[in-house]
Image (tube, coloured by chain):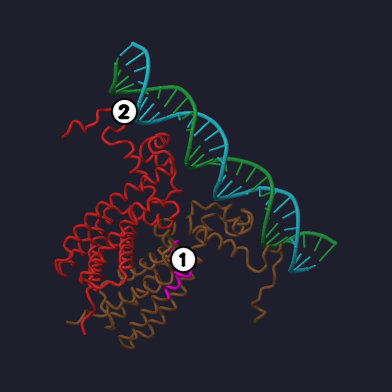
Chain colours: A brown, B red, C cyan, D green
Amino acid sequence: MAAMTMPRRRPGRPRRDESRPTREVVLTAATALFAERGFDAVGLREVAAAAGVDVATVAHHTGTKAALYDACFARVFAAEREVLTEAAAQARSVLDAGPDAARRALHDLVDVFVDFLEDRPETTALWLRRWLEPQRHAELDQRYAEPLYRLVTELLTAAAAAGALVEPTPHITVRSLVWAAHGHVVALAAGAPGARERREFRLFVHRFLDGLYGPPGP
Amino acid sequence: MAAMTMPRRRPGRPRRDESRPTREVVLTAATALFAERGFDAVGLREVAAAAGVDVATVAHHTGTKAALYDACFARVFAAEREVLTEAAAQARSVLDAGPDAARRALHDLVDVFVDFLEDRPETTALWLRRWLEPQRHAELDQRYAEPLYRLVTELLTAAAAAGALVEPTPHITVRSLVWAAHGHVVALAAGAPGARERREFRLFVHRFLDGLYGPPGP
DNA sequence: CACTTAATCCAACGTCCGATGGATAATCGT
DNA sequence: ACGATTATCCATCGGACGTTGGATTAAGTG
């Protein structure tokens, strides 16, 4: 693999763990703690201990505590954006291949979303904290939240325009599904029995989406 | 009005504000602050200042900071429980008066719930904080959250048993509706245009509930 | 009037926090 | 071999925090 892009080791004292950049180790530890207890309840010494380094090392890699917080959010949300953007593009590509194909595409899209949240439950925790304290996350909003909502809302709108489904208020539908999914993750974390709950929630969402496919016949 | 139940003024230094008990003033101020920023980001001196008293007065009336926090939650959740319990009883009483009546009763029930949340948005904030940090609210769960969920879930189950609607997983439906409502309140707080959004969200929920009334005909 | 009771505030204590200056170690470039 | 560069830790500072002891005020009670 391209030796040109493989950066030669730079001068300086070597990292404690050569396998993973210290910054990544710190961010991972901090993300878990922030997700569980929030900005103010987590001390930098605690983050440092969880990452196996000194508090000054944390500061050296991520600056102030607020910058560390933002970096944790950005990393998680960027991963989510990547997954969803691709899934939405795939859904859109089969949108006008008939109502059945469109329906399956939307099912797949929400399944990808729910899979992602179940796999990385800290995403839900961070989103909830962001919603609770919008003033602390103003910039993140424009970079992640708004584009994602717009993406999926436009997808629903396009599906409705193509006659695939009936949807008078797509932005409310999207928002409600997103929140229902977060509620699902919280219920799982609170100890709801796992496998069955996961299956039933997907069926619930599918059933709900199918309800949008035109009014019931007479 | 019963002079017997009207307590004579007890000895001691009079309150600053004779019209409202100091404890209530403190709880109201603390609730707003905790809802907005959470337990750790709010200082007792800040609460005291918002209530117009000294920090020692706060301690005198509510004990430790954790006790003050719990008292705020209990007050808000008790109000919610009161409203919902009555609305659920009313819905249940007309449940077997035919599908149309049952449908209207469920619409009314969720309207009461959404009305309450819109009226007191701090309820949503406190619920989200409780979900994020369940270990801090173990006792509140048993007193408020579980009974409420059980109440509404059993209502849906009874409605399904009476043949009024089709509902394979009532607990998931209830939870999803609750979370969608909280998402609605958060969107309103974030600046979504008010009156229209309120109307559309109710229509959305009604539409969703109506989708449970049997599968679409062939 | 004296005594009790209740509400309020002031001042202080010990603790923990985020941030920082500076020392040390290990690697690279020359 | 030697300075430059980077990573790491130790020690510390000023400030904010929750909590508490004790003084003060104003009412009821006898």
B151 sits left or right of A33 in the view: left
Query: At x 57% / y 53%, what residue is drawn?
Result: A46
Dot 1: element: loop
Query: At x 44% / y 73%, what residue is drawn?
Result: A115
For the image, the number of numbered tags is: 2
C12 sits left or right of B30 in the view: right
Please give the residue where the numbered disc 2 appears in the rendered image: B14
**Chain letter for the residue marked with disc 2 in the picture:** B
Q: What is the x, y in percent for residue B72?
A: 36, 46
Q: Nearer the viewer, residue B77 or C18?
A: B77
Query: Is there a contact, CB below 8 Å, between mark 2 and mark 1?
Result: no
Please give the residue where the numbered disc 1 appears in the rendered image: A121
Q: Quadrant of the N terminus of chain A?
A: bottom right
Occupied quadrant, residue B52: top left
**Chain letter for the residue marked with disc 1 in the picture:** A
**Magenta part of the chain:** A112-125
Q: The residue under label 1 is which amino acid type?
A: Pro
Q: Quadrant of the C terminus of chain A?
A: bottom left
Tell me if residue A105 comes above or below residue B179 in the rendering: below
Tell me if residue B199 comes above or below residue C11 in the rendering: below
